Image: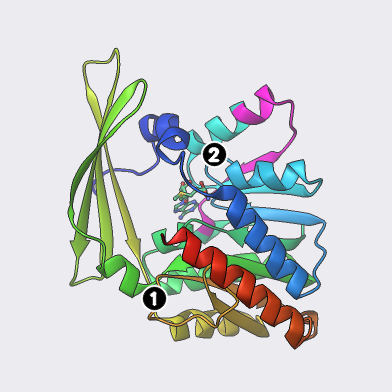
Amino acid sequence: MEQKAYTDSFASIYDDVMGAVPYQLWFNYLHELMDYYQLKPVKILELACGTGNMSFLFQKKGYQIEGIDGSEEMLKIARKKAKTSGIKIKFHFSDLRRFELAAQYDFIFSLFDSLNYILQLDELKQVFKNVYNVLVPDGFFIFDMNTVKRLMSITPGTSMLNGENYTCFWEDIINKEEERWQVRLKIYLDNENDYYEEFHEETAYPRKDIINALRQVGFQHIDCFNAYTFEQGSDHDNRLYYIAFKKATSARKKGRVVKTLKKIKWRFLHLFMSC
Ligand SMILES: C[S@@+](CC[C@H](N)C(=O)[O-])C[C@H]1O[C@@H](n2cnc3c(N)ncnc32)[C@H](O)[C@@H]1O
């Protein structure tokens, strides 16, 4: 990697740049999934929590949540927001490929293509193993990932993002050979003469490779949905949600009527989102 990603400059503008991200909708969708599988987690860990936006939503609903991320700069913002709102959340600093925690969690999740940042399948498998190790025996894991189709259909080019105190040039690069989406950022902060550069890189994996990797580390039951729907996910979709259970018996789905109702509701919302 030429430059680090999620350094101070991007962390400081991240929430503003991501201002339109529908965190509340993601939270609702996770809840619908948990309702469908009749899951009532108490202790939760958010992987690659960044500036903590999802963690705060869970905390406000009364869950015990902790976050973990590999960028101290993103965590600094998360901790500052927690302090300002008088919220107590433990944020751990660690690379997901190497993390170990003393606690055990009922539910672990990772959103916003964070796991697409893991560029090798064997490293992704190591992340899954680390997750498996800190889940309680009937724990479960939900994460989203962009598909190869999605990454390869991004249009290359540069756009300019203007905030109150920054200008950011965002260049999308498609590396077809390695099937990677790369983003080069040039960030100009007001009142500073210099600019900052970052390089971000995401890759994607076929659905079967992800499911195999989850199985190989011990997850017994795995389902995959087209994001924000209750339809089975495929490599032709753009973003997939995986739910992996340590024990097959924990995947106690509600009946067909409930699934059909959820399908209709989320099909409608999905259509609405793509408008
Ligand atoms: C797109 S941001 C998403 C942040 C947050 N989940 C959200 O929804 O706003 C990706 C996050 O993944 C983290 N990340 C990427 N690779 C990582 C790794 N190997 N270990 C730990 N964190 C990583 C970055 O630091 C960053 O905070």
Label 2: how many Cα within 10 Å (few below 14, some 14–19, many 20+):
many
Task: Identify the residue shown where x is 60% and y is 76%.
Answer: 230
Residue at the disc numbered 2:
51
Question: Horizontal and vertical percent for residue 171?
Answer: 21, 47
Kind of residue sitting beneath label 2:
Thr
Whole-Å distance between the Cαs marked 2 and 1?
26 Å
Question: Horizontal and vertical percent for residue 135?
Answer: 73, 66
Kind of residue sitting beneath label 1:
Tyr
Q: Is residue 244 visible?
A: yes
Residue at the disc numbered 1:
205
Relative side of 159 to 138, left or right? left
Q: Which residues are magenta?
A: 81-96
Q: Nearer the viewer, residue 198 or 58?
A: 58
Question: Horizontal and vertical percent for residue 13?
Answer: 41, 31
Task: Identify the residue shown where x is 67% and y is 41%.
Answer: 56
Q: Is residue 247 visible?
A: no
